[in-house]
Image (tube, grey):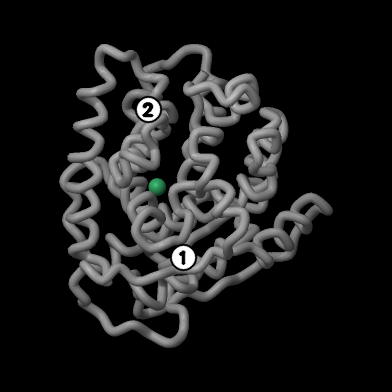
Amino acid sequence: MYIRSSLAIALSFSSQCIRSCVKPAVILWLASSFSVYANSEQASTTPITSIPTVTYQYLEPNSAQDKKAMQLIKQSDAIKMVNDISRQHVQFSPKLTIVFGAKDGTLYDPEIHQIQIPYQYINDAMIRFTQNHYAETGIDEVQATLDTLAHTLLHELGHAFIAARDIPILGKEEDAVDNFATIILLNYVDNGADIAISSADLFAFEDQDIDTFDDLDFIDEHSLDIQRYFHMLCLIYGSDPGEYKSLLSEIDDDSRQEREDTCIYEYESISRNWLRYLN
Ligand SMILES: [Zn+2]
């Protein structure tokens, strides 16, 4: 019900959908590479560097599946995106290290200035997209998984950027870095909205696994998966209400107009405030 890959929805081209509602963008996305462009509106704070300000480590995979995940990551556009972002918009000095194949994560460890991503993260995402027949939306499970990797890398990059720049966070940091990731996708990455939609859908899939909530869910540093899903859709909609008109169609008619207006405001506010800190 919440997901763009809701197949009946996608295949019937009903108005109640996510992935199929952005079909023109999907086609464009399929036809284009994952290039990054500079936003001319933001203030420049740090010179653009010619080389990425992140480095990568790939730990030895322990299984054939992990090896496949490692190869997928190495060849992915997500790495190129992070390289471009770390040169142009979010520079790190000293360089930030991203370790793939780590035991724990996904996480940013401020003590060693390192992002850790287990290969299992890729395997789990792939399973969820496959189980939900995501390929039938026009985005296959491999691409959807790499989309979520891109969003997750940006989320962790957000933690690192906050720590490195001592950026004041007036609220939940996890929400702030979710916003950071989505704002970067929407402002600097070609077809970033499509990448964000795949990532939002993974939150919706994860939400489907939950039968009941307990106190730990509510006190967790992260918002609930379903909240993260809707908030991402809200920002995407707010970034271009004309293009993503149908994105909020699963919200009741009575309250949709109000939410649409709020989403436009939220996107503008959050985008403007993050762009203060980005090149
Ligand atoms: Zn986080």
Q: What residue is shown at x 25% (from left), y 44% (from top)?
A: 267
Q: Please tell me which of labels 2 and 1 falls first in the chain.
A: 1
- Regarding mark 1 in the picture, which secondary structure is present there? strand
Considering depth in this image, is 233 or 174 the residue closer to the camera?
233
Which of the numbered marks, if any, corresponds to residue 114? 1
Q: Is residue 30 above or below residue 95?
A: above
In the visual, does 258 lie left or right of 39?
A: left
Percent from the top left, x then y, of residue 203? 49, 33
* Residue type indicated by callout 1: Gln
Residue at 48%, 55% (x, y): give it.
191
**Residue at x-position 71% and y-position 60%:** 70
Of residues 177 and 254, the one drawn nearer to the viewer in this rendering = 254
Name the residue at 61% across, 58% down: 31
Q: Position of residue 238 (x, y in %)?
A: 28, 41
Which type of secondary structure does the marked residue at label 2 adopt?
helix
Q: Nearer the viewer, residue 264 or 76?
A: 264
Position of residue 232 relative to residue 79, above or below, is: above
The C terminus, quarter of image: bottom left
How crowded is the residue under tag 2: few (<14 C-alpha within 10 Å), some, or many (20+)? many
> Is mark 2 in CB contact (under 8 Å) with mark 1?
no
Label of residue 257 in the image: none
Closer mark to the observer between disc 2 and disc 1: 2
- Depth check: give the residue in front, 147 or 193: 193
Q: What is the CA distance from the residue labelled 2 to the residue labelled 1? A: 36 Å
When the figure is inspected, residue 81 is found, relative to residue 260, above or below; the finding is below
Give the residue number, with chain letter if any, for mark 2. 248
Residue 209 place in picture, x, y as percent:
57, 21
